Amino acid sequence: MLGLERTVEGAARAKGEALVETGSLTFRGDAVDPATGRKFFLDFPCDLQPGEPVTFVLNLHGGGSLGNWQRHYFPLVDFKQSHRLVIATPTAAVQRPFAPGGPPVRVWISEEDDEHLQNIVNLVVAELGPESIRAFWLAGHSQGGMTSARLLQTPFFADRVDGFISLSGGRLGRAEWTPRFGPPKADGSPPEPRPSMPPPELPVGDFSFIYTTGEREIVALPETSPWAEKYGAGPRVRQPDIVDDQPGQIWDFGRCTYPVWGLKAGPGQAEVWRYPNARDGRVIADVVRIGKGHTEGLEPRVTDALLQLMLQEPGGKIAAGAAVSNGAAD
């Protein structure tokens, strides 16, 4: 794909502190957006066949992070072969203060990044063929989730995205952050309380929505969902818990002393709530990782469980859009 005979492995993959020690964390990937010259990761099955149906995921990192951090935080790459995934993981272009007066950090900015993100989607669709995109998901951690929600307000993404998974990046039907949410201060103490913000308006598009969060990040998970109500889904139903005996692959190595922000990654347990019988087969679910904070990488079983939910989305927007365009051309 895009001139790549295989996906990037080797030095680009490591676990824990080895990502920093080997310099792997800063690697940007081998795929290139020719319009901008920017590199990104493109992971896909090594035996992918022409015309084979795949699930395509655009996987966005959070503020202050990088693409290769995101590949390890939400390690879809470990399931690309078994679940027939194509995953694009880019890195934001610039560093800006995330809050007034704060230090500059790498963040997604519409005027700097939206064209690049659209280019990635167009490149992948052109390479695979629109009929091979079974479903297209946006995934985003933290500010990457907020960016995904913003992108869904634009026609390009609203017309193509079948599902959105927010990885501690905000819930449609807000789950309130804990008052002292954020990274610890330099001395390790909690940050100052966050100002209260009005909830954002719900997007107007049609797509599945999965929200996952660390238990320590939020005050409480709401018992209802306006997104579920939009699709006429039933009341939420508790699913079996997910128990992981293996840790996630990454965490905030330099600031892992404040539980709300996140400790060193470890084994975990997650509660799963599903809103059943949503119209058009939409998947609407909440997953709360017990005892976890904002930056602890997702464990293997919870990653797989989230993927199993994603694969239930009927999809088809990209293929249907191409069919309409071809019909108009005829």
Image: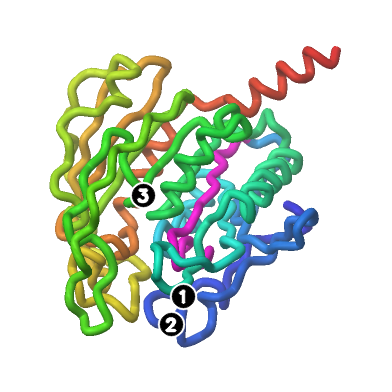
Dot 2: element: helix
The residue indicated by pointer 1 is: 14
Give the image quarter of residue 322: top right
Name the one closer to the observer, 101 or 319: 101
| Local crowd size for mark 1, using a 10 Å CA cut-off: few (<14), some (14–19), many (≥20) | many
Q: Is residue 184 above or below residue 153?
A: below
The residue indicated by pointer 2 is: 18
The residue indicated by pointer 3 is: 169
> Which percent across, then down, holds residue 95?
54, 68
Q: CA distance from mark 1 to mark 2?
A: 6 Å
Looking at this rendering, what residue extends furthest in the bottom direction?
21
The amino acid marked with disc number 2 is Ala
> Which percent across, then down, holds residue 161?
54, 33
| Local crowd size for mark 2, using a 10 Å CA cut-off: few (<14), some (14–19), many (≥20) | some
Q: Is residue 146 above or below residue 329?
A: below
* Residue 190 seen in the figure: yes
> Which percent across, then down, holds residue 41?
61, 60
Residue at image position (26%, 38%) is 174
Look at the image and give the residue range highlighted in magenta: 53-71
